Amino acid sequence: RRPRALVTPEGVTLHLRLASAGSRAGAFMIDALIMLAVLIALTVGAIFLIGGTRTVGPVAIIWLLGFLLLRNFYFTLFESGIRAATPGKRALKLRVVARDGGRLNGGAILARNLMREVEVFLPLIFLLTAQAEGFSNRWLGIIGFGWTAIFLFMPLFNRDRLRAGDLLAGTWVVENERPKIAPDLLAANDREAIDAYAFTPDELAAYGQFEIQRLEEVLHRDDRDTITTVAGVIRRKIG
């Protein structure tokens, strides 16, 4: 399951499991199907609103704009949320984290997703262009195929099975188990104390949902120095 240790800025070591290649591919397929459904709905809506058979040009422009926006901002938008995951990743219980243990920032999210343009969509353009006849276009097809193969097999040649976007952005895709604070940390009959561990949206925004989910490990460890350090960091973040 490829376990990894991640050290947070507070000095706490968290134990994570990297997502498997199959789960990442499955998440991408779910997201691709969602994007395809949105494009189909956009195309049908454009035909319905514009109407007529002489509107192929405007509909094509709307479709191309929709495709451009989806492929560049779909992943970035969802991974910028507190869950750091697209619908496909959420369905398979995956999320994106920063490899340095810090909070995932917008620059890393943008970098890892803009690289998808170089990894996937640009080679596809080469391959589609090569469908035309001619020697030069055949060479474009070969270049496109080689380019795609390099990025496709890149995860096989690094320890963490990272694609180019993850290498550039300093990110991992990990399994997200979403643990809850265990009742055995509290008195079994103390309902009010158990309810006290429900975190508000403001608290999630201050510290991060992923970090809060991992606090159970810190509490179970019962290391007073670590707990004091983490508490101090939270106090500084919330003022």
Image: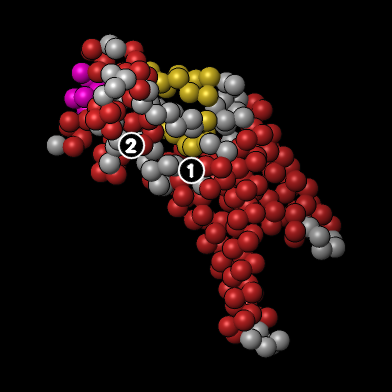
Kindly identify the amino acid type of the residue bearing the numbered disc 1: Ala
Whether residue 224 is situated above or below residue 58 in the rendered picture = above
Residue visible at 28% across and 18% down? 187
- 229 in the magenta segment: yes
Q: Quadrant of residue 208?
A: top left
Q: Is residue 125 above or below residue 102?
A: below
Query: On the rendered structure, is 131 left or right of 152?
Result: right
Q: Is residue 213 visible?
A: yes
Q: Are marks 1 and 2 in contact (CB under 8 Å)?
A: no
Residue located at (19% from left, 25% from top): 232
Which element is circle 1 on?
loop
Of residues 53 and 108, the one nearer the viewer is 53
From where the camera sits, is residue 11 visible? no
Q: Is residue 129 above or below residue 233?
A: below
The residue indicated by pointer 1 is 85
Relative to 198, say whether 190 is above or below. above
Residue located 48% across and 23% down the image:
16
Q: How many marks?
A: 2
Tell me the chief SS of the magenta region.
helix
Q: Nearer the viewer, residue 158 or 8?
A: 8
Look at the image and tell me in which quarter the N terminus lies.
top right
Corner quadrant of residue 125 = bottom right
Magenta-drawn segment: 228-233
Describe residue 94's horizontal placement relative to residue 144 as left or right. Answer: left
